[in-house]
Amino acid sequence: MGIAITFLTLFAASALAVFSIQKKRDQVRQQATEALAQRLGLSFYKEDNFGLLAQLKDFDLFHRERGWLGRNGKIRNVLRGTVEGTEVFLFEYSYLVSTGKSTHRVSQTVFFANDKNWYLPNFRLKPETWWHKVRGLFDKSDIQFPDNPEFSDQFWVTGQFDSLIRQTFSPDIQQFLNERPPVHLEGNNFYLLAYKPGTLLPVESAGVFFEQLCQLVALLKKEGKMELLNLAEIKPLEARKVKM
């Protein structure tokens, strides 16, 4: 009996120590993210005050959570602003994965752009791996770009209406994506989502990621012109303007 009590006491103490360490890390990251928002001229929110989780539930990224026991996805450390009239967000999305014997948290940095004047085709873009190349032998869903074999070789692109997707990914946008670290993109009508699955970027790297995606948004809005957004034009969206 005494051994059992000792074991439970040690287990509880260890669990409390792990929880305290994680809480401290979360606090440090929150402070660093808030400082990043100030440097970029963005609004910062500790929690998802915008209903993003419900708004984005149909995207592939958020489907993954539903494949695991315990559907408890959470969005926090939200940055919000505008790029040439397009609402943009950067946030952390996490959920718990439980196998029955153990539980761990999956977290990733996510960029989201929302523009009611956009009419993006439904598409998914991801870095092409060796498995995609094997899969391509019998699966012809990968949309090819004959004028840019490098882009076709680097990315696996799927979706509805091939011609519209090729039109969306103009030569300038193809070049932009080829020259930057691989990223997963999802588009649908008013929405553009970008992330690296299971990757929670360091705060400073998340800032660079955000700036690069803002440039992509600007390029999409300029309909293929090479002139990109001057990042100084990113404007904060005040909390009082938020429609709940």
Image: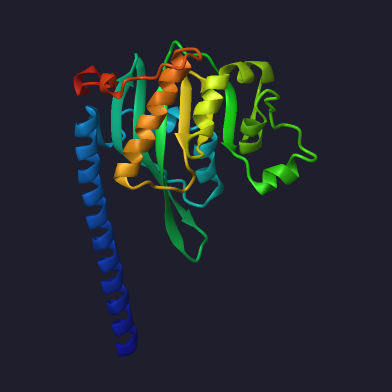
Looking at this view, name the residue that lies furthest to the bottom. 2
179, 92: nearer the viewer: 179
136, 231: nearer the viewer: 231
238, 95: nearer the viewer: 238
Residue 231, x across and y down, in percent: 30, 24
Residue 148, x across and y down, in percent: 65, 26
88, 84: nearer the viewer: 84
Q: Residue at x 51, y 62 (%)?
A: 100
Q: Could you tell whether 169 is left or right of 15 in the image?
A: right
Q: Could you tell whether 146 is left or right of 5 in the image?
A: right
Q: How is the image coloured?
A: rainbow
Report whether residue 58 is seen.
no
Q: Residue at x 24, y 62 (%)?
A: 20
Pick the quarter of the image with the N terminus. bottom left
Looking at this view, name the residue that lies furthest to the right. 138
Q: Residue at x 67, y 48 (%)?
A: 130
Above or below, 67 against 233 in this view is below
Q: Classify residue 222 by image quadrant.
A: top left
Residue 81, x across and y down, in percent: 29, 24
Q: Residue at x 30, y 44 (%)?
A: 203
Pick the quarter of the image with the C terminus. top left
Looking at this view, name the residue that lies furthest to the top. 117
